[in-house]
Amino acid sequence: MGNIYITDMTHFAGIPADSEYAAARKVADFFGSIVSVASISPAGELIESALFCRRRPNRVPCAGHLQVQRDKVTDLITWHCSQCDDQGQISNWKSSIWDLSQFKENCSAKQKILRLNLTRDEFHELTTIPIPVSLYKVLLFQTTIIKGEYILKATLEELDFLQQQIACVISVEIKPDRRRILGEIYERMDILLEEEDQRDPKLFEEANLEAMARLKELGFHCQGCGNCCRGLGFELTLEHYETRRWRNFSKVVPSTYGYYYPSDFMSIIAAADCADLWFHPETEEELFRCPFLKKVRSQNRYQCLIYDLPELRPGACKSFPMKDGKFMAEMINICPELKRLKQKGSM
């Protein structure tokens, strides 16, 4: 028969930081972790969480994990160890420092969820990474166990963020075993992300192709005036899959500042894993003109230095002057070819 714990989380509020209270904080963190799992999980569902049991019968760690459930009506949290029968109830947890329900509410139901399979040892290594970011904690608490495997669930952006954090840890890790485990996790993440990168932009790319086909049908021929790139090119933002392409592009490309990697001109928006353009590759100062736009000598026209690299050209550039399948009417005074088509009555 296991132990039964009846816990009121208000009893753990304000535990002093002194070393003599370390044991109390450890107990608070155990019950707090259960609260975190329950607060971001659907009420009424039994969650096979990735939380380890804290019991040590005969000084041997229990191999069980915690099953957690939050009542739909009372919000009372009940938990139970899958092996040793330790169990309990937790009340008065709302608005505590362990309550992560705000992150559950901010999750978008439209975003695709990816699943990364982990072993117990791999998941344990992830829990030891000291990253003081709420998103990282949420990803760990969302992890569940299915048939003995730890399933980490995240959106593409979240998984990409996690991979970046792991890369930072690997770069300074001195323990060979830990470097190996984290390296294996990193590689599996890379495979999963690359697979999604091939699928995720398809709809967007198809929209680009439709826009380009429509332009061709109307007889649109770019005159190379450069007005769009000079006037609007500094307002671009890369989508997350474009950001990964730029970050992983291994060759330098020509620009008006010399030869640089594409990623040298972008600045990551951490929260969204998108990238703002453009930034000086050396000073990192914001640029107000596309660095890949070059004036053709002795001619009144411009050329795009990455035009023949479709994997690098931003989607907004490929589909210009169309957006969401329609012409951008406000561009007529900027684009002479649009103006010509309008006067011709083609649009």
Image: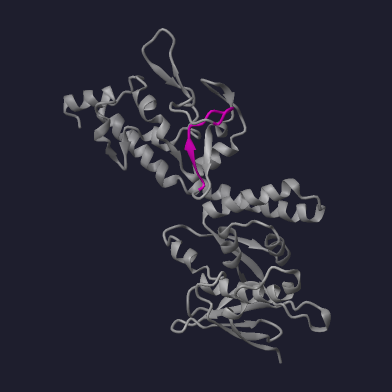
Quarter of the picture holding the C terminus: top left
In the depicted view, which residue is nearer to us: 174 or 295?
A: 174
Q: Quadrant of residue 237?
A: top left
**At which x and y percent is residue 47?**
56, 76
Q: Which quadrant: the N terminus?
A: bottom right
- Does residue 68 appear anywhere in the picture? yes
211 horizontally vs 62: left or right: left
Residue 147 in sight from this viewpoint:
no
In the depicted structure, whether residue 53 falls above or below residue 108: below
Percent x, y for residue 159?
57, 54
Dominant SS of magenta comes to loop
At a point 78% along the width and 77% down the height, the residue shown is 61
Residue range of the region highlighted in magenta in the rendering: 273-284
Image check: 71 left or right of 168? Answer: left
Please determine whether, in this image, residue 304 is positioned above or below residue 81.
above
Q: Position of residue 294 (x, y in %)?
A: 45, 18
Above or below for 275 versus 136: above
Residue 247 in the image: above or below residue 342:
below
Residue 276: in magenta span: yes
